Image (cartoon, grey):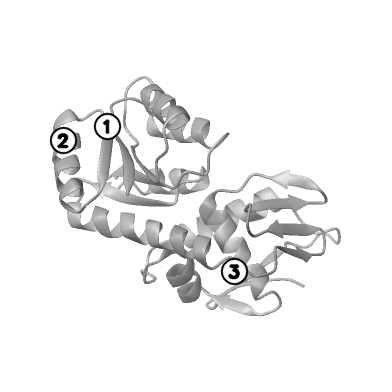
């Protein structure tokens, strides 16, 4: 697995690189956002690990620029206890986050979960090439979503959430199922990442022609994509 690690802490970069390479991962380093974007534009990576706090071009700015042209899975490195960093990162299209100072074992687990989810969706694409529900069209092979023929830019994680919800349209999909099947991890009590991803989906898809939200929150249970 080829990973780009972006952090201005040189010592931490080399420590994490050494640990990840012991786990049979190939790691390249960048120490600022601009360099990271240049590398992503010219090389193929399977995942990006991106620190929030960097000078000149911080992690949020880098992620925002990246999402204009790439759905590369991103794990954010956030300051320990800074909930706002996690929320902002998820709103902007990050797939997951790990708090610093990070436990390398946790980072490896998060990397493998994101990678496993991505690979599973590539292997298990639906036999049906496209799914149409009202004015929303999903192309499973190209992972393109259109609303009324207009392309909607979704992150890889947002697409996976939408694909699962539409596959079960009209029924309630539990938060536990969303977490395990899309995020590849057990639901944690205070983890709000699912809510942030669903919020992003609602904003990007817009409301139905009747003015209702496409995705309904079933308090205490999960979410339901309305038929």
Pointer 2 and pointer 1: residues touching (CB < 8 Å)?
A: yes
Towards the viewer: 80 or 19:
19
Q: Earlier in the sequence, mark 2 or mark 1?
A: 2
Label ID, residue 164? 3
Specify whether 209 is left or right of 166. right
State the SS at label 1.
Answer: strand
Residue 80 seen by the camera: no
Rendered view: 2 above or below 112 = above
Cα distance, mark 1 to mark 3? 34 Å
What residue lies at 57% left-to-right and 34% top-to-bottom? 69
Q: Which quarter shows the C terminus?
A: bottom right
What residue lies at 74% left-to-right and 51% top-to-bottom? 146
What residue lies at 83% left-to-right and 51% top-to-bottom? 148
Cα distance, mark 2 to mark 3? 38 Å
Towards the viewer: 217 or 3:
3
Specify whether 105 is left or right of 81. left
Horizontal and vertical percent for residue 107? 25, 53
Label ID, residue 29? 1
Residue that sits furthest to the top in the current view = 56
Residue 152 seen by the camera: yes
Pair 1/3: label in front = 1
Pointer 1 and pointer 3: residues touching (CB < 8 Å)?
A: no
Residue under label 2 = 14
Horizontal and vertical percent for residue 94? 45, 46
Horizontal and vertical percent for residue 55? 32, 22
Dot 3 crowding, Cα within 10 Å, few <14, some 14–19, many 20+ = some
């Amino acid at each position: 697995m080829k990973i780009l690690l972006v952090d201005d802490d040189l010592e931490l970069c080399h420590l994490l690189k050494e640990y990840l390479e012991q786990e049979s991962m190939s790691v390249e380093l960048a120490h600022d956002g601009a360099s990271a974007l240049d590398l992503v534009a010219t090389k193929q990576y399977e995942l990006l690990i991106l620190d929030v706090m960097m000078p000149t071009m911080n992690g949020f700015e880098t992620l925002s620029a990246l999402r204009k042209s790439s759905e590369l899975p991103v794990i954010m490195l956030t300051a320990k206890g800074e909930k706002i960093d996690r929320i902002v990162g998820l709103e902007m299209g990050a797939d997951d986050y790990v708090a610093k100072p990070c436990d390398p074992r946790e980072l490896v687990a998060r990397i493998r979960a994101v990678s496993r989810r991505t690979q599973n969706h590539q292997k298990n694409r639906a036999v049906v090439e496209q799914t149409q529900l009202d004015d929303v069209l999903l192309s499973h092979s190209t992972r393109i979503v259109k609303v009324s023929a207009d392309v909607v830019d979704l992150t890889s994680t947002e697409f996976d959430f939408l694909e699962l919800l539409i596959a079960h349209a009209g029924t309630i999909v539990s938060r536990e199922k969303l977490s395990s099947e899309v995020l590849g991890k057990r639901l944690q009590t205070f983890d709000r990442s699912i809510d942030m991803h669903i919020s992003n989906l609602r904003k990007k898809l817009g409301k139905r022609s009747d003015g209702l939200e496409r995705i309904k929150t079933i308090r205490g249970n999960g979410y339901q994509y309305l038929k």
